[in-house]
Amino acid sequence: MKFTEILTKIDCRSAKELEKEPKFLKNGDVGFMKMIPTKPMVIETFSEYPPLGRFAIRDMRQTTDIGVIRSVEKKNPSGAKVTKFTTKKGGK
């Protein structure tokens, strides 16, 4: 997962926006970030399907980030490889 942009910094108690586009977040800070996956993955927004709407990022056997997915920008899968399994129709 690659963090591309920090959108806002939020007060976790009141859920009010403290700062727009901060340069960094310190330990314990809460914010909205834009992330791009480095590998293909299956995700959904937390409101649509909670089990696929959570994430945890680990580094050196320690959890560094946790969160929920608020929105997803899906790419057009036109360049995806089509296999026999995906083109089969019917029961077998």
Image (spheres, grey):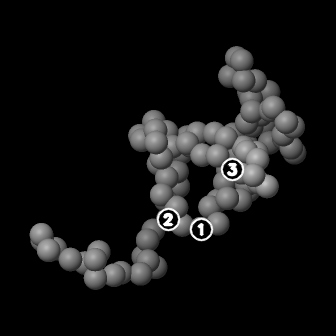
83 vs 7, nearest the viewer: 83
Residue lying at 79% horizontally and 27% vertically, measured from the top left: 18
Spatial CA span between label 1 and label 2: 13 Å
- State the SS at label 2: loop
Q: Residue furthest top?
A: 14
- State the SS at label 1: loop
Q: Can residue 2 be seen in this view?
A: yes
Image quarter of residue 76: bottom left
38 vs 59, nearest the viewer: 59
Q: Position of residue 82 (x, y in %)?
A: 36, 81
Q: Where is residue 44 in the image (x, y as percent from the top left)?
A: 47, 48
On the rendered structure, is 41 left or right of 48?
A: right
Q: Mark 3 points at which residue?
A: 57
Of marks 2 and 3, the one in the foreground: 3
Crowd around label 3: few <14 · some 14–19 · many ≥20 (10 Å): few
Of marks 1 and 3, the one in the foreground: 3
On the rendered structure, is 77 left or right of 39?
A: left
Mark 1 / mark 3, whichever is N-terminal:
1
Crowd around label 1: few <14 · some 14–19 · many ≥20 (10 Å): few
83 vs 18, nearest the viewer: 83
Q: Name the residue under label 2.
A: 75
Q: Position of residue 32 (x, y in %)?
A: 69, 39
Disc 2 marks a residue whose amino acid type is Lys
Q: Can residue 45 be seen in this view?
A: no
Spatial CA span between label 1 and label 3: 14 Å
Vertical position of residue 55 compared to residue 29: above or below: below
Q: Mark 1 points at which residue?
A: 39
**Number of the label disc, if any, that sits on residue 27:** none
